[in-house]
Amino acid sequence: DKKFRDYRGTLELVDVDGRNVSKKIDALDGLSGTFKFKPDLLTASSLRGRYKDVPFEASGALRSFERLAIEADVRLDMDVDRMQTLLPAAHREKLKDFDLSGECEAHADLSGSLRKDSKVETAYRLVLRNAALRNDAKKIAWTKLAANVLMDDEGVRIEEARFLASGK
């Protein structure tokens, strides 16, 4: 029974399409980037591709091949309408009464374990730029909106918001 005690390597992806990536991710297209591996550590850097036709960048690490501990950050630039289609249903439900438009940078921060008996937690952070938010029933009409919107299992939190409110 031979075991590898010390190994190192690099895997370079160039325009690779991945299918059935996970239960939640059916496909990733046009993947390019670098994976580096050594005992008990796999890192991804400058990983780029498309998820549902939206370009993304990602980086992260898988530590301990026994525990499969993962930490990763995925970043996407898109318009707010497209972003909302990518959110989990529970988060879309929280935004359903609002008309939101503009540009955003979306981050998904993942941490946890990939083991079958474990869970990967995901925290979403949206950086809104030149956005508008409207809800006629609540008499909200904001323009030139810039804010950080954080969403996780605890709910939605808005930080560092700046906007112009119309006089309704």
Image (tube, rainbow, N blue to C red):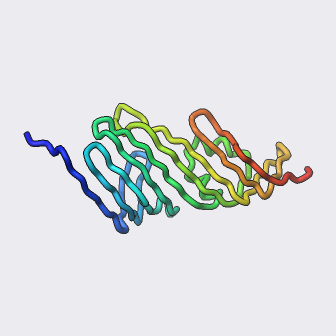
Of all residues, the one furthest to the right in this rendering is 167
60 to 121, vertically: above or below: below
Residue 94 on image: x %, y %: 66, 41
Identify which residue is drawn at 51% across, 45% down: 109
Is 61 or 93 nearer to us in this picture? 61
Residue 32 on image: x %, y %: 39, 64
- How many numbered marks have been drawn onto this rendered protein structure? 0
Is 65 or 119 nearer to us in this picture? 65
Of all residues, the one furthest to the front in this rendering is 6
Identify which residue is drawn at 54% across, 42% down: 123
Residue 62 relative to residue 130: left or right: left
Residue 107 relative to residue 81: left or right: left
Quarter location, residue 4: top left
Residue 102 relative to residue 21: left or right: right
Residue 134 on image: x %, y %: 78, 51
Residue 111 on image: x %, y %: 45, 40
Quarter location, residue 81: bottom right
Identify which residue is drawn at 58% across, 60% down: 77
Quarter location, residue 39: top left
Q: Quadrant of the N terminus?
A: top left
Of all residues, the one furthest to the bottom in this rendering is 15
90 to 80, vertically: above or below: above
